[in-house]
Amino acid sequence: MCGIVAAAAGSNIVPVLVEGLKKLEYRGYDSAGLAVIGQNGIERVRSVGRVAELESASAATHSPTGIAHTRWATHGIPCERNAHPHVSGAIAVVHNGIIENYESLRQELSAQGYVFTSDTDTESIAHLVQATLQDEPDLFQAVRLACQRLVGAYAIAVIDHSQPGRIVVAREGSPLLLGVSDTGNYAASDASALLQVTRNMVYLENGDVAELTADKVRIARLDGTPVERPIHVSQLSAAAVELGTFRHYMQKEIFEQPDALANTLEIVGGSKTIQPGIFGADAGQLLAGVDSILILACGTSAHSGYTARYWLEAIAGVPCAVEIASEYRYRVSVPNPRQLIVAISQSGETADTLAALRHAKELGQPKTLAICNVPESAIVRESALRFITRAGPEIGVASTKAFTTQLAALFLLTLVMAKVKGRLAPEQESTFIDQLRHLPVAVNKVLELEDAIEVWAKRFADKHHALFLGRGRHYPIALEGALKLKEISYIHAEAYPAGELKHGPLALVDANMPVISVAPNDQLLDKLKSNLKEVQARGGELYVFADADSEIPESEGVHILRLPEHYGELSPILHVIPLQLLSYHAALVKGTDVDKPRNLAKSVTVE
Ligand code: M6R
């Protein structure tokens, strides 16, 4: 999704803007631009395509004050005319989010003589600020007043050539933080863009407006009331966002999973028991009255929820439903104040998940838990309880290590709920904890399958469709495998519970339709084997990820890779890894942009 970087310093900030945009590339974008306060007016450079092109195009631009942007098209096609910054007279604006009342603003401003040159909603902000400056010449006040008229979600940064050295930023619904230092002050959509200049971050709240100069920051609410926001020292490591020796972030992140899991599970320490307190100080009390669970999430995070449903019902005996956040928020549902709402999100800023969480609270459901990878995110801040997965920054658009660490967190929730419900014997608890602790080692062994998976992936070069099968708690893993393959290799992929095959999808099976099956050695294995026979009998090509002891023989049209260990309840965490690797290598074979697949964004901060 769009990314913003802004800088006011004592020397040329163009390299800082460009470097910041490079760090935000992972969010997904299709054009980029920057504007600085130059000698004779606003100097603007925009380009369709990569930030590297913007870097070359802006090589001769110098200024101590400027704003920059990567755009993920919502209103208007990706083209230079629609790229940010948008200019009105002496001012330039960058924007992340969606302005819902932009059409009425556009009509009103056009009637006043403002000429629109793009199809974007953002341009109406530029003209609105310009129009407001006619009565209120101070940029800070003008932006504050203009924001009062905006409906929707936004993070914006504004410069004015007639007020050099100043940047005014504001946020409502879209992420924005400030970076403060002795050599300058900055703003960005996330901390990774600013680590190059400072670790001291100030997280703006919704409804905040801030002014930055090289040596000063001031913040106020939209009504003008001054506010102070604390400085957080970011713990994000700059190395964590470097590619190192890997070809892509996705590959790096797949291989970081042993560490990500170890870090996430560190909270359990050397203990043989697990306490509700890992979800927050009030967790014991809040969870005691819980009679059911509703998980709200999108995409991959929803798949971790679907997996957890099997655990929560089987192990903890707690009724659990999982709902796609964008559906839940708009349907009429029956609120249950004793239900625990679990919002799962890597970014913690996904607009649909955040809105669903707020919707649940408005309905009178106060028991909320965030499972999230970003501690300062809105979803975490707005939930009563929280569990922070410690996957580290996930840059690749395709979510990998966030998923497996979410699963680890959800298994911990299952154990806590089982304990709260008096369903967890001490020996069972200690066995599960030992299995969790062993996960990083087990994942490392699965990663050794990469070379064999790469060979399989080459056979996907000419494929346009694929079917994924799983049963029980591995059905959501099949869903996740299909999502991974489609989003990065653009091969159309669908997942089915294997037992559902004969109810329709079997009609699709022929020699051109690879069928990928997750086949752990669990109580459903024999049933699954029958389903695989149905595929084989129709000439389908089967790619089976089995456990070492699954006893499915290799034969004509049946390719088998065996995972080294059989992992019981936690098996989904191991079985998703070969599917991630398969998608990654299939995408390489197809030659797609693995980390930034077309049309997608990392952090989906619009509806
Ligand atoms: O940040 P979130 O976990 O809330 O994001 C949810 C989805 O947008 C995300 O998982 C998406 O489906 C990924 N691209 C999948 O790889």
Image (cartoon, rainbow, N blue to C red):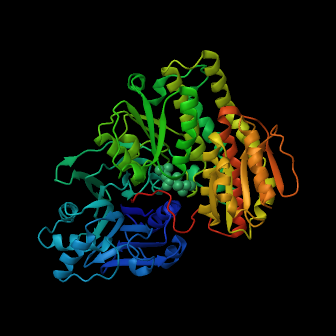
Q: Quadrant of the C terminus?
A: bottom left
**Residue at image point 71% right, 41% down:** 443
Is residue 107 toward the left or the right of residue 178 in the image?
left
Q: Is residue 450 visible?
A: no
Tell which of 369 and 603 is nearer to you: 369
Is residue 398 toward the left or the right of residue 325 in the image?
right
Up the image or down, 23 lies above or below 32; here it is above
Is residue 588 toward the left or the right of residue 177 in the image?
right
Residue 129 position, x and y percent, is: 22, 70
Tell which of 537 and 134 is nearer to you: 537
Tell which of 79 and 515 is nearer to you: 515
Residue 471 position, x and y percent, is: 66, 43
**Residue at image point 41% right, 53% down:** 326
Residue 149 position, x and y percent, is: 19, 63
Q: In the picture, residue 65 is in which quadrant? A: bottom left
Q: In the picture, residue 384 is in which quadrant? A: top left
Up the image or down, 205 lies above or below 39; here it is above
Up the image or down, 265 lies above or below 112; here it is above
Q: Is residue 220 visible?
A: yes
